[in-house]
Image (cartoon, helix red, strand yellow):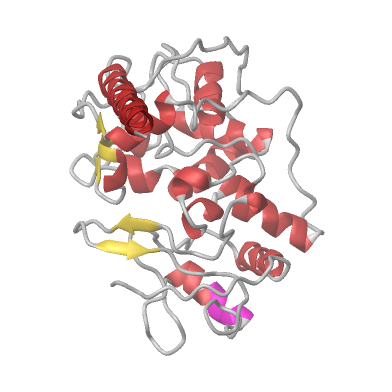
């Protein structure tokens, strides 16, 4: 029996040592790099694309990349995701040295689809990837980033390097989070006459709503969003600009813990203005109102949410 305990103790000790070595390697190695593919792409910057690109950039890029001090997409510290470390959104103005002014259209498209920069640097989960965004919308974002709009005017502002947490290093180092594959087939825009399909595209393809409103960033299924644990049931922990913890809300149609008692008009007002009819704030940082969405677009999202399975998950508002 003593030998059994002795061997058991040795085994446990070896496991502890190996885990310690693995943790040390992950901490030192940091986020792995990959080989970036070369994508041949030349986007025609039509006025229609630039306008649509500005709309999408306002909803997808502005919250992280817009700096109030410069009035441009020069990046700033992201205080709403402390679990990922001390993270700074990068300068994505047309500056050729400190921004993306020297990037090709293909390199921008590749980053937005896969999360890989031209040098192979991988941007972890805090940088949204857009595997379901239609090609036309992707081209519109690129056209806007190339435009003369003040937000993307070349600016040499340098932001500090990010310091990822051990969690970020671990999930990337172990391959739990890695670059998405670049789509092999074209991705078409949805039929806007099919309200449910249109709403699904806006919620999942354009706005990535599920990423925050499902249970956990690290456990989301970004290729099959509807298979994410706690899909649209809320409970994902974040922080506001003051560093105060908040939890994403349940937006399934559960009558007790979700938004099942809301009307369609309640939903439109909440999404576009951030307010409920009786004056209570419906939205909290880091989510901001989507005033640029049309009523038809929000109605389409509402129609899609009617098809999402209800989840009973009571989430206490922390703010």
Residue reaching furthest to the bottom: 278
Horizontal side of 25 relative to 106 (left or right) equals left
Question: Would you identify the image quadrant in which residue 99 lies?
Answer: top left
Is residue 268 positioned above or below 229 on the image? below
Quadrant location, the C terminus: bottom left
197 drawn magenta? no
Horizontal side of 94 relative to 209 (left or right) equals left
Q: Could you tell me if residue 148 is visible in this image? A: no
Horizontal side of 229 relative to 16 (left or right) equals right
Q: Could you tell me if residue 17 is visible in this image? A: yes
Quadrant location, the N terminus: top left
266 drawn magenta? yes
Query: Where does residue 166 sit, x and y in percent of width and height?
Result: 28, 33
Query: Where does residue 286 sit, x and y in percent of width and height?
Result: 34, 57
Q: Nearer the viewer, residue 170 or 269?
A: 170
Is residue 103 positioned above or below 58 on the image? above
Residue reaching furthest to the front: 1
Question: What segment is highlighted magenta in the picture?
Answer: 264-268
Query: Where does residue 143 sit, x and y in percent of width and height?
Result: 53, 30
Q: Nearer the viewer, residue 25 or 172?
A: 25
Is residue 40 positioned above or below 240 on the image? above
Query: Where does residue 186 sit, x and y in percent of width and height?
Result: 75, 29
Q: How many labels does the image show?
A: 0
Q: What residue lies at 69% left-to-right and 65% top-to-bottom?
A: 308
Q: Which of 132 and 266 is in front in this view?
A: 132
Magenta span dominant secondary structure: helix
Q: What residue lies at 38% left-to-right and 18% top-to-bottom?
A: 101
Q: What residue lies at 48% left-to-right and 27% top-to-bottom?
A: 115
């Amino acid at each position: 029996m003593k030998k059994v305990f002795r061997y058991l103790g040795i085994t446990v000790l070896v496991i502890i040592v190996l885990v310690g070595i693995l943790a040390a390697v992950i901490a030192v190695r940091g986020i792995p790099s990959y080989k970036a593919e070369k994508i041949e792409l030349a986007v025609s910057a039509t006025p229609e694309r630039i306008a649509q690109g500005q709309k999408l950039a306002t909803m997808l890029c502005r919250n992280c990349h817009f700096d109030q001090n410069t009035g441009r997409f020069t990046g700033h510290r992201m205080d709403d995701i402390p679990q990922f470390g001390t993270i700074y959104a990068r300068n994505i103005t047309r500056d050729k040295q400190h921004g993306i002014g020297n990037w090709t259209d293909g390199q921008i498209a590749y980053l937005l689809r896969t999360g890989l920069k031209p040098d192979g640097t991988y941007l972890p989960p805090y940088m949204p990837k857009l595997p379901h965004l239609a090609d036309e919308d992707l081209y519109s974002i690129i056209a806007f980033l190339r435009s003369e709009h003040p937000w993307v005017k070349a600016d040499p502002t340098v932001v500090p390097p990010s310091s990822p947490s051990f969690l970020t290093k671990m999930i990337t180092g172990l391959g739990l989070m890695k670059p998405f594959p670049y789509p092999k087939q074209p991705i078409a825009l949805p039929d806007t006459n099919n309200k449910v399909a249109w709403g699904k595209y806006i919620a999942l393809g354009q706005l990535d709503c599920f990423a925050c409103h499902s249970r956990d960033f690290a456990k989301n299924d970004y290729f099959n969003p509807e298979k994410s644990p706690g899909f649209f049931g809320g409970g994902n922990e974040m922080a506001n600009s003051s560093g105060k913890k908040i939890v994403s809300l349940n937006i399934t149609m559960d009558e007790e813990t979700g938004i099942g008692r809301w009307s369609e008009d309640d939903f439109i007002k909440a999404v576009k203005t951030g307010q409920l009819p009786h004056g209570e704030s419906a939205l909290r940082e880091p989510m901001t109102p989507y005033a640029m969405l049309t009523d038809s677009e929000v109605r389409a999202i509402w129609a899609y949410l009617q098809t999402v399975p209800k989840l009973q998950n009571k989430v206490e508002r922390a703010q």
